[in-house]
Amino acid sequence: MFKSSRTVSKVRLLFQRSVSYNLPSIRLLDSLKSTESDLPGLFSNKTINELWYNRGQALVDNLNAQIIKNNVENAPANLEELIKVSFSKNDLNALFTNASLLHNLQFFLESLKTNEDRSFSKAQISALLKTPSTSIKVENAPQDESLAEWINDSFGSMVEFKTLLLNSAASIKGDGTTWLVAQATYSESAMRDGASTGVSFDTLAIVNTYNAGIVDDSMRSGQVTKMKHQKQLKLDAANRRDQERKEMAAGEVQEQGQAVEEVVQETQKRSISADENALGSVEEAEEVMLFSDRKLVPLLAIDASMRAYLEDYGIYGKRQYLENVWHCVDWDVVASRTPKRFKPSMVFEY
Amino acid sequence: MNLFDSKYSTDLQSQITLSCQILLSLQIHPLPLYACTHTQNFSTTTAPHMFTKIALAGRSSRRSQFGIIKRSLHDVPVLKKQPEFAQNGIAGLYSANGFKSAWSEYQKYLTTNLTLKTKGTQHETRTPFQIILLTSKNGLEQPIFHYASQAHNNHLFFELLTDKDAAAETVPSRFLMERLADENILTLQDLKDKIIEAANTLTGQGWVYLVERGDKSLKVVASNNDGTPYYFGRGASFDMNGAISESTYEQYEALKEQIKEDELDFTLPLLAINVWDVAFWADYGLNGKQEYLKNVVDCISWDVVNQRRFQI
């Protein structure tokens, strides 16, 4: 007994070494931590510690615990890959949740810079009654010309973009993240450059995700449809079989038609649960997989959860927090994440 | 206070028992009025001079048909032990500052926003509770629903709380324990464990309720974000972000069916626990959820829970 439990712990140790995750390092935050200073213009040192070093570490610990618990072998070292492989498996839901929360938080914090011109303090109740500014001047707008142009083309103008982005974040009541994403449509990409397999991104858009939600909805969407299809396939297979049985039975005993009907109905019910391994056709399988035509690539994330602003801005301070986030966005990071834009050489107006 | 002045409340209660039909025709559900009495969020203490002071009873009592409907600001209700809590906090759970943050400030935030969202709309004379019922089926009214639901739930929660020592002297009634036994909850400790377990199923913000359903059975349920116990379509009991299990899918399908058939929901909350960050960050830190949960289940006055059972 004693011996065997020792081997188990050894195996676990091995596991931990091979696929354990560490808290990713974020250069700006690490330097602030070592000097115990605030992130000027956005966060106090206490918030940085709570938000990233404590919460981030807790998420990493949960993640590692889940990997051990579920005996996940060869977990990919990359967090995004891990999310991709764990997303569609219901028994890995807790693993996915922790990985995704960590990824979203990291994505947000990595695109921040300091801004000495801004300050933060706890807001009073009067902040709720403040009239929004109507100024069309936007400070800290992206300097990268092609990014700025793409934003203007997609949202109308920089101020419209900023308003939409911050309002989307303000509308999240629980936990969540607001994203700027580049969007491509698979079917349109295929039409444009028939031979090449790449997708071409033509629009920028804003997306909200809640709790551990992920941006890429080619992974996310359609899970209910998928379930529905699976159920329908099982039902159809069972029906077909029962129909055959019924025909055979009807040939033998024509007179007892009604009784047979009842029996068939009953077996139908039973066989649905018994027949777990029914396979659909390839066509059906493709139909199930083709739920989303969109490809989204995240460029910028804003954490809109309460925990990001409670400490420094207070309960009434979400607006001020979001305004400060805008001023602390490092657009160079955003530009470096931006994929190549597809720009039609001709625009057809209908 | 307007609707539940003593002279109106007796009148109301006799109406509830005598003529449910009249109330139904007024689109006010007879059952939840009970809950309304202890979750009133209206107060005339803020700037009363701004509004005509005439009772709201015109809506529900036929006696004052020509009464002018009163409009008031939503404001933070006064708790029974408000002065004591404000000064010393709640022993075993909150410091004075923690109490201020989770109740005084957060409730002020919710009620102010609710006033702002409802002014000039059909909801402006309604209580948060009525607003919950009337907006829960309409997704477009989600912003209003959010503030009404949160304000109502937080009041349900804070009415329960009491000092740890005082809480230890109260127990769930025999009736309550008998019903809980059907759910395999045999002791008070079991119930506390169950509440903490439910709170830990939430990924983000949310609530844990002990609810009494139409058939008198009790259940501990967890709701994501601003989920309400009053309407199954807005219970928000599952998070569909990850891969869903077949049982979740079936629950979801069943829910769709229930909503389509306009099924009535007679569920009432007996107990609500706030599992939002705002309920604990001031005293326990942003990562202090577990410690907070451990303390909060020991500071519940079961006398209040016992009284909330639906009784005719």
Image (tube, coloured by chain):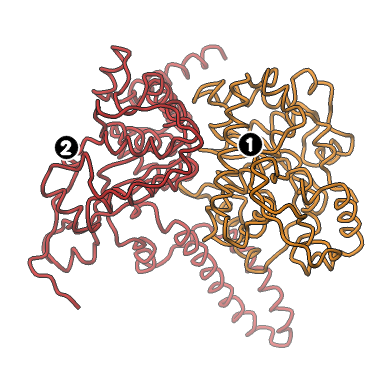
Chain colours: A red, B orange
For this orientation, the residue located farthest to the bottom is A255
Q: How far apart are labels 1 and 2 at the CA level?
A: 43 Å
List x then y, in percent, for residue A343. Answer: 12, 60
Q: Looking at the image, which residue is at 52% across and 71% down?
A: A236
- Asked whether the viewer can see residue A287, the reply is yes
A160 vs B23: above or below = above
Front residue of this view, candidates A182 and B278 = B278
Q: Are marks 1 and 2 in contact (CB under 8 Å)?
A: no
What is the quadrant of residue A264 in the picture? bottom right
From the image, which quarter does the N terminus of chain B lie in? Answer: top right
Checking the image for residue A282, the label placed there is none
List x then y, in percent, for residue A190. Answer: 18, 65
Which residue is disc 2 drawn over? A332
Query: Which chain contains the residue that carries disc 1?
Result: B
Foreground disc of the pair 1, 2: 2
Front residue of this view, candidates B215 and A37 = A37
List x then y, in percent, for residue A263. Answer: 70, 73
- Asked whether the viewer can see residue A15, the reply is no
- The amino acid type of the residue labelled 2 equals Asp
Front residue of this view, candidates A36 and A99 = A36
Checking the image for residue B198, the label placed there is 1
Image-based side of A143 in relation to A73, left or right: left
For this orientation, the residue located farthest to the left is A345
Image-based side of A105 in relation to A235, left or right: left
Q: Looking at the image, which residue is at 28% across and 19% down?
A: A30
- The amino acid type of the residue labelled 1 equals Ala
Mark 1: which secondary structure?
helix
